[in-house]
Image (spheres, rainbow, N blue to C red):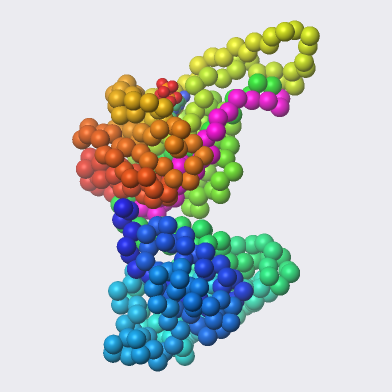
Amino acid sequence: MTDIAGKKIILGITGGVAAYKAAECVRRLGDYGIDVHVVMTQAACGFITPATLQALSGNPVHTDMWDTRIPNAMAHIELSRDKAAIVIAPATANFMAKLAHGQADDLLSTLCLARECALLVAPAMNRQMWEHPATRRNVAQLQQDDVAVLGPASGDQACGETGNGRMLEAQEIADAVAAFLAPKTLAGVRVLMTAGPTFEPIDAVRGITNRSSGKMGYAIARAAIGAGAKVTLVSGPSSQPLPAGAVVTQVQSAADMFEAVKRHARQADVFIGVAAVADYRVDKPHEHKIKKTEKAQLTLKLVPNPDILGWVAAQPKAPFTVGFAAESQHLETYADEKRRRKKVDMIVANLAQNAIGADDNEVMLLDDGGTHKLERAPKEAVARDIVAHLARLYRTRNPSPSR
Ligand code: CTP
């Protein structure tokens, strides 16, 4: 269970075409264990039905100020009192204008005005509406009032135009909300990490790589950012969306990854090696594409790559180091041997056959205190548990926010 699981939020849906994405938002927030309570404006009900949202969230949906299901008939106050945040997705230009001016003429806007918790909005509107000076003023006012504005993104719009104003995707909204709700256990801590596979060139067009997707590493980057860390991510080739808020250096080979890590290592408080780094590279890759010949065999000479994690852990003022061990058998024994050999503070061990490319993962964490097994869960949830555990160990050794 993550630290955000069980937290309650209100998901406010206002009347825009992007309301259809709100259904997916409920599901993705649910993946984090967040308990979602939906409140809809009348206009939102024109785009998506309360019954759909009720079925997906498992909670009654509220649309009306005069809802008699609330014992004291004060829905506009009571509904937000036990909530960690109100998230408006989609937030129309009109609704943001109402928020900016403190108007309260329906259940959702009244809840926002009467709230004690945080407010996050995910704008969704036509690009001209987003760029209109009135909307710019309203957004600036909301930010000044400590309202978190998520997005919007740029791209194709329902009206057929292209530009700024598209609502973020459901997963991006769920990730941002989860990051917002996460305890700030790594506030101000500088985390350097590697993720993804490496690509070791053979010639101008071919290379040796592996099936690591980067999902686990990127999820850990997002979890660390959510915990308040400043994350520098050195990533091998990955098709995953880059974690918002991380400083990212994209590399290809293990040698490039090593150079990038060496540049940043001295400023790091924590180093996490998640990358599936190739143990060997091709000695002297060909500058041009190798042509086939009549020879029966072609031999590639491989030479060892530097051990990036081992190098970081061996530095005189080494950061708190976390390594990964992907084994196919004898998981705990092999992983613990790796932890001692590489002299790292913590090892995250998983079965390679269960983890590579998958959306969920089952890991065990090994440190001086012993072995801690985590349940199989989506990689985002596992990432939060890993970050929570490393933050506890790191804080035990470094009680101050940063070295
Ligand atoms: N690692 C690294 N640089 C390398 C190789 C691995 O930083 N050249 C890091 C990985 O990011 C991971 C850990 O070391 O954190 C994995 O350790 P390693 O012993 O390389 O694992 P395997 O390659 O699985 O080793 P073995 O073949 O011995 O199981």
Identify the residue shown where x is 39% and y is 73%.
Answer: 59
Q: Nearer the viewer, residue 257 or 219?
A: 219
199 lies above or below 285: below
Quadrant housing residue 288: top right
Ligand 1 position by quadrant: top left
Q: Where does residue 105 sit, x and y in percent of width and height? A: 47, 90
Q: Where does residue 287 sit, x and y in percent of width and height? A: 71, 20
35 lies above or below 284: below
Quadrant housing residue 44: bottom right
77 with respect to 248 (left or right): left
Q: Residue 345: in sight, yes or no? A: yes
Q: Nearer the viewer, residue 181 or 139?
A: 181
| Residue 205 painted magenta | yes
Q: How many marks?
A: 0
| Residue 5 painted magenta | no
Q: Where does residue 14 sit, x and y in percent of width and height? A: 53, 78
Identify the residue shown where x is 54% and y is 81%.
Answer: 45
212 with respect to 291 (left or right): left
**Where does the C terminus fall, quadrant-wise?**
top left
Identify the residue shown where x is 45% and y is 71%.
Answer: 55
365 lies above or below 97: above
Magenta stretch? 204-231
Identify the residue shown where x is 40% and y is 70%.
Answer: 58
85 with respect to 280 (left or right): left
Q: Where does residue 327 sit, x and y in percent of width and height? A: 40, 28
Q: Residue 230: in sight, yes or no? A: no
